[in-house]
Amino acid sequence: MDPVFPRLTHIALHVEDMDACVAFYQYYCDMEICHARNNGQQRIVWLAESGREKDFIFVLMDGGRNLALPDDDYRHFGFAVPSREAVDDLAERANARGELVWPPREEPFPVGYYCGLQDPNGNYVEFSYGQPLGPGAG
């Protein structure tokens, strides 16, 4: 019998403002609601990139508290984009809305060109080009 290896399928987050978080990931990441339900008093929403609903999802659950991450804390969710211009566009949009935390910057391979945003719950979200993962893989 071959060994069975686990595969990462989702990340689950408790959030304080469900509607704001769903809107953030729809606006910046083009994620779609692929499942929503109430479990008693708790609201649960699954978000996925189009075509990846059976591959990887964000599970958002209400009842959480907003995070207060320090500026030098680099824990984040990482999304790849297809160009440097896409990084710049996301940074401009986020800056206009007060959600930019790391302006676009270039770092040696494998990091590439990236910027960072903060979602309504306080999580950092990176958008990168030129990493060896996803669109724009270098």
Image (tube, rainbow, N blue to C red):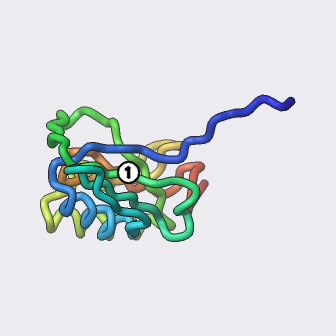
Q: Give the left or right position of residue 8, taking residue 86 as reference.
A: right
Q: Give residue 96's quadrant in the image.
A: bottom left
Q: Give the left or right position of residue 21, taking residue 130 as reference.
A: left
27 up-or-down from 16: above or below: below
Q: Secondary structure at mark 1?
A: strand
Q: Is residue 103 among what the camera can see?
A: no
Which residue of the protein is positioned furthest toward the front in this rendering? 40
| Percent coordinates x, y for residue 37 in the rendering | 33, 60
The C terminus: image quadrant: bottom right
The N terminus: image quadrant: top right
Q: Residue at x 16, y 54 (%)?
A: 17
Q: Amino acid at mark 1?
A: Val
Between residues 49 and 60, which one lies in front from this camera angle? Answer: 60
Q: Residue at x 32, y 68 (%)?
A: 26
Q: Is residue 93 among what the camera can see?
A: yes
Q: Residue at x 27, y 62 (%)?
A: 22
Which residue of the protein is positioned furthest toward the right in this rendering? 1
| Percent coordinates x, y for residue 119 in the rendering | 23, 53
Mark 1 lies on residue: 59
